[in-house]
Amino acid sequence: WYLGWKERAAALLAANPAEVNRRYDEGGLTLLHIAAQKNDIALAEMALAAKPDVTITDNWHDSTPLGWARFFERKEIFEMIQHFEAQQKN
């Protein structure tokens, strides 16, 4: 993703949507945690389109992606995740 291969990353995720919940490094971060940390709107959009499990918590702070968005004050990503959660309840 950060090497500029965004189309390839999107294609890989489309081919295997379960990858959206993969946990990375010792922190156990998902793509959505990383998007919140980096304030990467495009990554958040791609992750949310794959219907992630937004209840997954990281290993460092035991926090969901929504918690990370709140902590890092990523208002747009925070609102995106909230909207996604509301849609999932319907």
Image: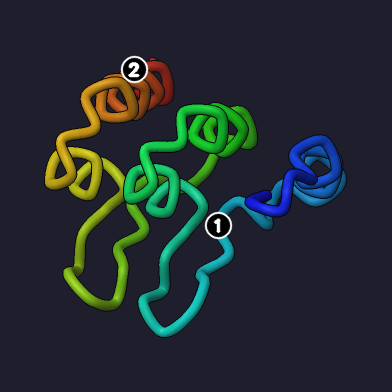
Residue at 26%, 29% in the rendered image: 78
Q: In the image, which disc is placed on residue 83?
A: 2
Q: Nearer the viewer, residue 74 or 20?
A: 74
Which residue corresponds to the image point at 12% horizontal and 46% vertical from the top-left? 71
| Residue 61, picture quadrant | bottom left
Q: Where 80 falls versus 74 (above or below)?
A: above
- The answer to whether 24 appears left or right of 63 in the picture is right
User: Which amino acid type corresponds to the residue marked 1 in the rendered image?
Assistant: Asn
Question: Which residue is tagged 1?
Answer: 21
Of 88 and 61, the residue lying toward us: 61
Residue 59 against residue 70 in the figure, above or below: below
What is the three-letter code of the residue carrying label 2?
His
Mark 2, Cα crowd under 10 Å, few <14 / some 14-19 / many 20+, is: few
Residue sitting at x 28%, y 24%: 82
Q: Secondary structure at mark 2?
A: helix
Quarter of the C terminus within the rendering: top left
| Residue lying farthest to the bottom in this orientation | 26
Residue 15: percent from left, percent from top: 87, 45
Tell me residue 69's x, y (percent).
24, 40
Q: Give the side of residue 7 with respect to residue 85, left or right.
A: right
How many numbered callouts? Answer: 2
- Bin the neighbour count of mark 1 within 10 Å (Cα to Cα): few under 14, some 14-19, many 20 and up: some
Figure quadrant of residue 21: bottom right
Q: How is the image coloured?
A: rainbow
Residue 16 spot, x, y in % from top left:
80, 51
Q: Position of residue 52 (x, y in %)?
A: 52, 43
Towards the viewer: 16 or 35: 35
